[in-house]
Image (cartoon, rainbow, N blue to C red):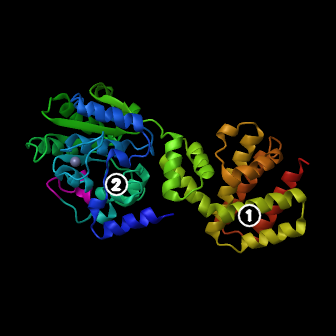
Amino acid sequence: MRLGKIANKFAFALGFHYLCSMQFKDIVGQHLLKESLARMADSGRVGHALLFTGREGVGALPLAVAFAQYINCAQSVGGDSCGVCASCVQMNQLAHPDVHFVFPVNKSKSAEAVSGADGDKPVSDHFIAKWREQILQVVPKGYFNEQMWYRTLDIDNKQGNISRYEADRILRKLSFKAFESKYKIVIVWLPERMNPQAANALLKILEEPWENTFFLLVSHAPERLLPTILSRTQTIDVPAIDPGALSAWLRATQGLPAEKADALARVSFGNLLEALRLLSEEEQDDEQFDLFVQLMRLSYEDKHLALLEWAESVASMNRESQKAFLENTLRLLRDAYMMSMGMDEVAYLYGKELAFCRKFAPFVNNRNIEALTRQTQQTVDDVARNGNPKIVFTHYALTVSKLINRLR
Ligand SMILES: [Zn+2]
């Protein structure tokens, strides 16, 4: 199931970066878009600045990288880059001398050693090794979000940004002739993380005609970009991944049965990262879900002794698990309530959670949802305050039982 990931890590550890290609064929779904990008490049009518826009998890960044590879490939065939020419081999390692990356960064704990002409101002080049690793090590390649990147950067809870020093660097790089390829390409990931000075500096660069140079901007929040930048770029809208294509990918790489893969593709709204998150959450949530089902069944059946036993077993778990159980319970209560109100489309459930909550929904409604939520939240606080777990969970179980039974 996780074989792809392991093989990939293994290859990376051994330095077999060339095993990682990022061609159109490696992008999940998006067939129409891939075709139209290839056609655009073939016709030689690529605008000098393209803005790829799309939500996280739909593949906007890997598409931009695959497009860059396609543009510079010496022998593209059948609407995709060849993967083996000199340019493609360099792209496979994200080490192409004519393809430059700009992305949000910040001072990280592990970056003390970094210093360059810009002193201690963090710029993308300082973190290029981590960037390559981030793109190539995830499965599938290039699918990650901003939070995952900041975790890799090791910048704690700080946010990354793109400073105006990046603009100076871009200018310096563009002042050289292309090393080996016909085109120089600058890929800017999350231009919305530019501060106003940086945005204005980039705008000046975009205003100038640069010979044989393409700017590929990749944004999750184009509405936060300067209107002047929007007006100088051609927008490439990257839609949600087609559910059929996402389901096929989930089946092939995660070993899921068709029915489950279809359900995941649907509830994740064509967002690959969300589908993977739901999948891993489901694996972890088994214990918490079982405890939830037990509590609700015993409550409904009003089995006091069994409820006390239930409380005792939860009290014996560590505090982190207790908190995770309660938070999972809050989520399930909310979704069951939505279903009982007939708002199935805002309940993000599938699989066995969906099956149980369908049956359970009639027992959560306006008469008890507030009290159930408040009581669960209160228990989270009690656990955090180090209350005696046996007392805390006995009280919780009996209160929940009363609230559920109120509806009988
Ligand atoms: Zn090639």
**Measuring 73% from the left and 64% from the top, which residue is drawn there?**
291
Please state which amino acid type lies under the numbered disc 2: Ile
Left or right of 376 in this view: 150: left
Earlier residue among tags 1 and 2: 2
- Quadrant of res 314: bottom right
Left or right of 37 in this view: 29: right
Residue 126, magenta (yes or no):
yes
Residue 224 position in % (x across, y down):
38, 33
Residue 336: give its label: none
Range of magenta residues: 116-129
Q: Secondary structure at mark 1?
A: helix
**Measuring 85% from the left and 61% from the top, which residue is drawn there?**
298
Dot 2 alpha-carbon crowd within 10 angstroms: few under 14, some 14 to 19, many 20 or more? many
- Quadrant of res 393: bottom right
Q: Which residue is mark 1?
A: 291
User: Is residue 185 visible from the viewing direction of this image?
Assistant: yes
- Quadrant of res 380: bottom right
Q: Which mark is nearer the camera, 1 or 2?
A: 2
Left or right of 312 in this view: 128: left
Q: Secondary structure at mark 2?
A: helix
Q: Is residue 204 above or below residue 359?
A: above
- Circles 1 and 2 in contact, beta carbons < 8 Å: no
**Measuring 22% from the left and 57% from the top, which residue is drawn there?**
120
Residue 135: give its label: 2
Residue 27 position in % (x across, y down):
39, 46
Residue 339, magenta (yes or no):
no
